[in-house]
Amino acid sequence: MINKNLCLQLSQFGSASIYEAQGATGALDSGIKPLSHTMQVFGPAFTVDIRPGDNLMLHYALLHIQPGDVLVVDAKGFIEAGPWGDILTEQAMVKGGGWTGD
């Protein structure tokens, strides 16, 4: 069960501080960057491990995520094709996913 009060408290700190406080674990690869410097993401991570070129587990994950969850996908560095497209975006939006920004 997600402790929403803890999530709210953690949202007051930067990711580097949280990383250090939890024993230097849980950092994302430095190659992962936002599309814009104004973008931010925060929420409980829902992790998915997929095979390169196969997005079946993404469809399965979208059956289980809750509003506010952050989907984190390990696609094994596969860059020949994207595992995410319009259909998955529509499904995520129906489930309450989305983003905010200025």
Image (cartoon, grey):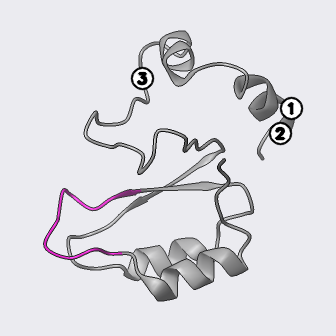
Provide the residue span drawn in magenta.
73-83
Residue on which disc 1 sits:
5
Residue 72 place in picture, x, y as percent:
46, 54
* CA separation in Å, label 3 and label 1: 22 Å
- Which mark sits nearer the N-terminus, 2 or 3? 2
Residue at image point 28% right, 33% down: 30
Q: Crowding near pointer 1: few (<14 within 10 Å), some, many (20+)?
A: few
Please check the rendered image and state whether residue 82 is part of the magenta-colored stretch, yes or no: yes
**Residue type beneath disc 3:** Thr
**Residue type beneath disc 2:** Lys
- Looking at the rendered structure, the secondary structure element under dot 3 is loop
Residue 20 place in picture, x, y as percent:
48, 11
Residue at image point 86% right, 32% down: 5
Residue at image point 75% right, 33% down: 7
Instruction: Indicate the quadrant where residue 50 lies.
Output: bottom left
Residue 15 place in picture, x, y as percent:
53, 24
* CA separation in Å, label 2 and label 1: 4 Å
Please check the rendered image and state whether residue 12 is part of the magenta-colored stretch, yes or no: no
38 and 11: which one is in front? 38
Residue on which disc 3 sits:
25
Residue at image point 54% right, 71% down: 61
- Looking at the rendered structure, the secondary structure element under dot 2 is helix
Q: Crowding near pointer 3: few (<14 within 10 Å), some, many (20+)?
A: few
- Looking at the rendered structure, the secondary structure element under dot 1 is helix
Residue on which disc 2 sits:
4
Whether the residues at callouts 2 and 1 have beta carbons within 8 Å, the answer is yes
Instruction: Indicate the quadrant where residue 53 lies.
Output: bottom left
